[in-house]
Amino acid sequence: MENSTKILFVLQGLNETVSSKQTYFFPALFFYLFTVLVNLTLITTIILEKTLHEPMLIFLCNLCVNGLWGASAFYPKILVDLSSDLSVIPYEACLAQIFVLYSYVFCEFTTLAMMAYDRYVAICKPLNYHSTITPQKVMQLLLFTWLLSICEAVVLVGLVVRLPLCGYKIDKIYCTAWAVIKLSCVDTTINNVYGYMFMIFHFSQVVLILISYVNIIKISVRSRADRRKFMQSCFPHLIAVISFLFAFIFDLLFARYGPTSRLQALRNVMSLDYIVVPPLLNPLIYGLRLNQVRRRIFRIRSRKIRALK
């Protein structure tokens, strides 16, 4: 196909549920609206309450912003697909979805790594915490996270755009870089090399997260106060890391090396996990586990109720 911009991709991930996919529309709409609600609640609470302007909570706020960024690339399109008979997406829209979803993934990895570093310094080196994790450094890290994620995604999309395509059927429910690369008519070595580069880089972040938590756990078991601190601020973060990492690795490896004609339902679930679950789970587990956040949410809510009266 000489002119790729005229391609209309067919998303085949919903083929097995084509007869009943309209029944999933309202659950998907509910999850989307609920995801937006809980993330916006946590973001506004952290922004409005100056007592919550702590590095860990600023990183959490960034995690919620990133969750909304990723959800915005997935939910509107899947809602359209669930309400129609055929799931298709134009070439340009597919590239836009790839850009947003991959920048979301990259930003999620880097933000989780920064949060692990913050908890490591707070628990293992508490005397150096305020001199190490300064407000200026927090802003620099956040700026670095978004610039890095956007640059990685731009390069990825640029490497996909250059490929001439010989097909139009994508065996997923949304666009991914590898699904489009497999349709290429030419050699894709450069794309593969770049893919392995960012895999190594972000998995090295995971290794750093694990090393941080090994050291945190060693310190935390020494006293009841440290164990309580670990359970309140670190355990939710550990859940977020494990959930996101497991689903992403499964989807990545299955997309590259797994069979394309079997286990479509399982593949759909796992490919949805790291897009749907983190934006929904992160504000809930942090909002419920962190006492200061929970108290401020209830306080703001009670203020609004009194104002209405």
Image (cartoon, helix red, strand yellow):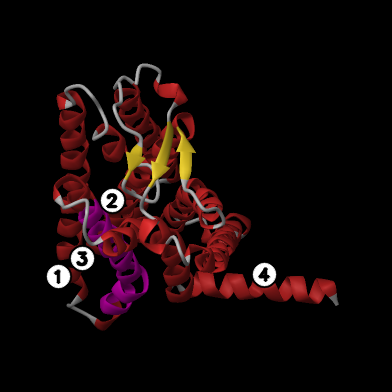
Which is more N-terminal, label 1 or label 4? 1
Q: Is residue 125 visible?
A: no
> Within the magenta stretch, is there residue 232?
yes
Residue type indicated by callout 3: Ile
Which is more N-terminal, label 3 or label 4? 3
Which residue is tagged 4?
300
Q: Nearer the viewer, mark 4 or mark 1?
A: 4
* Inter-mark Cα distance, 2 to 3: 14 Å
SS at badge 3: helix
SS at badge 2: helix
SS at badge 1: helix
Front residue (pair 240, 26): 26
Asked if 59 appears above or below 295 in the picture, the reply is above
Magenta residues (range) = 226-251
Residue type indicated by callout 1: Lys
Q: Is residue 44 left or right of residue 147?
A: right
Which residue is tagged 1?
218
Residue type indicated by callout 4: Ile
Which is more N-terminal, label 2 or label 1? 2
Q: Residue at x 14, y 48 (%)?
A: 257
Q: Residue at x 30, y 71 (%)?
A: 235
Residue 189 image offset from top left, x and y in percent: 14, 26
Front residue (pair 278, 30): 30
Front residue (pair 144, 22): 22
Q: Nearer the viewer, mark 1 or mark 2?
A: 2
Q: Nearer the viewer, mark 4 or mark 3?
A: 4
Instruction: Tell me if mark 2 has few (under 14), some (14-19) or many (20+) residues whose alpha carbon lies within 10 angstroms of its own.
Output: many
Tell me if label 3 and label 1 are in contact, CB under 8 Å.
yes
Badge number at residue 113? 2
